[in-house]
Amino acid sequence: MSPELVSILVLVVVFTLATTRSVNMGALAFAAAFGVGGLVAGMDADGVFAGFPGDLFVVLVGVTYLFAIARANGTTDWLVHAALRLVRGRVALIPWVMFALTGVLTAIGAVSPAAVAIVAPVALSFAARYGISPLLMGAMVVHGAQAGGFSPISIYGSIVNGIVERERLPGSEITLFLASLLANLVIAGVVFVVCGGLGLWGREPVPASADQGGGTPAPARRTGTDSGRPTGDGTGGTRTATIAPASQDGTEDGIADEDGRGPRLTPARTATLLALAALVVAVLGFDLDAGLASITLAVVLSTVWPADSRAAVGQIAWPTVLLICGVLTYVGVLAEMGTITWAGEGVGGIGVPLLAAVLLCYIGALVSAFASSVGIMGALIPLAVPFLAQGEIGAIGMVSALAVSATVVDVSPFSTNGALVLAAAPDVDRERFFRQLMVYGGIVVAVVPAMVWLVLVVPGWG
């Protein structure tokens, strides 16, 4: 049995054990990386750790730390109230606002994970407050980021167009952009309907007590003994929304002031808003690392307002960090062993171009659900060159199909964007939300590559 096949079978075992024994998949993946890397591939510890996603670790920790502080001092409550006023109380428009916002950010040059890191915590805080499905809101944020991700001036668009030019393939920047935009827009529309978005129309803008799948919420109960935030698992179970007694600054747990005007800006909230704005400027304007910038801003806020920040470190999504970093470390071992290239070359050698094309789309989607989307596109587009040279398949359609297949699956909880969504969701049963994202990611992997193949490759675009 070849080492590449052994590494794939071990990955299947990791998934099986994590599902049936409720063991953290990241811990299993670290053990698998140690075993496969050392015993099968002959790698030392340094070689295994080379695949550890240090940048993603810092992003997950930094972003969840900063937004834990924002939740503790009521800043996210102020933001969701402001968003509600922006759409004049139409709760159903909020997911589309978040879709458009992340799309604009990536279209003008933001890296997709950076845009998701900025928008997802606010979007999911809103979802938790108003009983919107976290799966719906998270998917809208990620698909929005991918919708704008291939504009001619975007990071992804520039990379793919550069690969096409280097390989001397016919290309169309506009076709690539529109293919991703329309594919993600259609998927977002389907998710909106399936996850209860239609039920949000006409919903009163009050905290929800109904399920998060789009049912009609009951009015919030004011109690003098209940405190804090709405309770419930946040993933579709029943929630009981309560409003806490007024705090010293005149707000009621950030939901509304006694005069009904909504949460007020305090010095801590103002500083936090400035910190969030600084994060956007640092990431988009100066191309600084989102994780390092987030941690730095969080430390500054913690120093000035230690009482608000005392519990924030404990709210960092440590189980999610372990899960994602473990799985990606094992994927790094697979890449170092050549397993991914081995699979791609096997498909590329098939003598039927259309069949090879759809299989490459599926490989791109499946691997990208765990690894770098850009890296997968950089590996698979050159593999497609031999049968593109035969002239039976249009290069523009094939490149666009590969690009969409390799990025639309970023809703997977093992990808950077999906991990950010999982880590940013407040008041949810994370294991259940993880399973929801994994099932949804699996559906996307199973369906979308075939769809884009039918639309973009079979007609022979380009």
Image: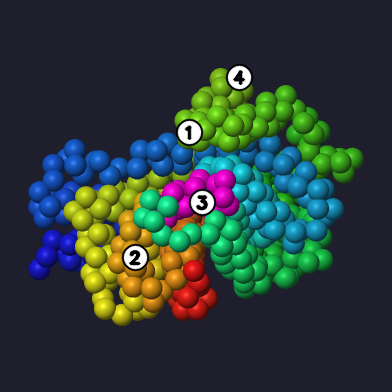
The residue pinned by badge 3 equals 157
| Depth check, front residue: 331 or 88 | 331
Direction right: furthest residue: 259
Q: CA distance from mark 1 to mark 4?
A: 23 Å
Q: Give the foreground label among 4 and 2.
A: 2
The residue drawn where x is 72% and y is 42% is 79
Residue drawn at point x = 82 percent, y = 41 percent: 262
Q: Is residue 161 magenta?
A: yes
Marked residue nearer the N-terminal end (1 or 2): 1
Q: Secondary structure at mark 1?
A: loop
Q: Amino acid at mark 3?
A: Gly
Q: Please, what secondary structure does the residue beneath circle 4 have?
A: helix
Q: Between residues 78 and 189, which one lies in front from this camera angle?
A: 189
Query: In x, y percent, where is residue 183?
Result: 57, 67
- Residue type at tag 4: Val
Question: What residue sits right under mark 4 in the picture?
Answer: 304
> Quick one: label 1 or label 4, which is nearer the N terminus?
1
